[in-house]
Amino acid sequence: AQTVTQSQPEMSVQEAETVTLSCTYDTSESDYYLFWYKQPPSRQMILVIRQEAYKQQNATENRFSVNFQKAAKSFSLKISDSQLGDAAMYFCAYRPTGANSKLTFGKGITLSVRP
Amino acid sequence: GAVVSQHPSRVICKSGTSVKIECRSLDFQATTMFWYRQFPKQSLMLMATSNEGSKATYEQGVEKDKFLINHASLTLSTLTVTSAHPEDSSFYICSARDTDKNIQYFGAGTRLSVL
C-alpha cells in the first residue's frame, strides 16, 4: 500500500524568507502523480503544485517549487519569499495513474509565517 | 480556473434528521468525485468514491446506509447523511477530478453539527 509521510507537524518561517516542507512516500509504481495542497484557515483545499513522476524536471509555480527525488521517494516543497498569506496547513499527496485511482494524503504540516 | 461548488457550507440539524450535501463541478465534467471527512487539525479521510451512473465505492469502515451517495450526472454528486447523530458532526469535503487535466479540485467543505 502507498503511504505518504510528513514527519514535521509544524514549521515557522519569517516573512520574506524561504522554507522547505518535506515529504516522503512509498510506492512500488513507476508512474504516478505527486501534489502539494494548501488548506488555509478557511479550510478550502487549494492545489499548490503537482509533479508527474515520469518528468525529471522539478515543477515550479511562481514562488513555489519542488525538489523531486524519485529514487529517494522524496518530494519537498520550497516556498520562497514567504508571505503572511502562506500560513496554512500543507498536505503532500500521492496518486497512482489510473481512472479510479485515489489520492493518499500525508498528515499535513502547519506552517506559520512570522511578520 | 476549475471550480467545485459545495453546498451548504454550514448546517445544524437535530439528531435523527437527514442532511443532504451537494457537490457540483462548474467548469468541467467529472466522472469521478470523492467524499472526505476531516477532523480538526487532521488529514482528509476518504469516505467514498463516486462514479457517474454507478454505485459508489465505500472505504472500509464507512457505512453505506448511513452515508448515501448519488452521482446522477457528470457535474453533480450528493452525500446524504441519514439519521444523523452527534458523532456524525464533522467537516465534509467533496472533490471532483478533471480527467483532462488529471487534477483533483476540492469544494469549500460543509461543517455539519448535529445537536
Image (cartoon, rainbow, N blue to C red):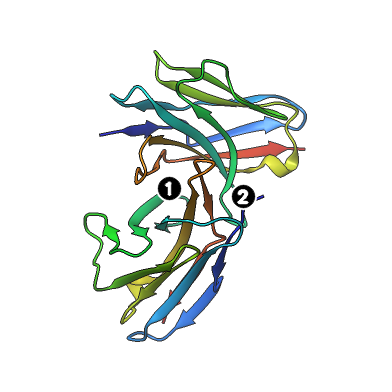
Task: Check disc 2: other Cα within 10 Å, few if <14, some if 14-19, many if 20+.
Answer: some
Residue at 53% x, 54% y is B106
Label 2 marks which chain's residue?
Answer: A
Quadrant containing the N terminus of chain A in the rendered view: top left
In front of the other: A112 or A89:
A89
Name the disc covering residue A40, or none. Answer: 2
Query: Distance of mark 1 from mark 2, alpha carbons?
Result: 13 Å
Residue B79 sits above or below residue B52 on the image: below
In front of the other: B25 or A94:
B25
Residue at 38% x, 33% y is A4
In front of the other: B104 or A68:
B104
Q: Which image quadrant is residue A70 in?
A: top left
Locate residue B25 relative to residue B16 in the image: left or right: right
**Whole-percent x and y of residue A25?**
38, 27
**Amino acid marked by disc 2:** Pro
Quadrant containing the C terminus of chain A in the rendered view: top right
Locate residue B12 relative to residue B88 in the image: left or right: right
Residue bearing the label numbered 1: B43
Task: Note whether residue A7 is visible.
Answer: no
Task: Check disc 1: other Cα within 10 Å, few if <14, some if 14-19, many if 20+.
Answer: some
Mark 1: which secondary structure?
A: loop
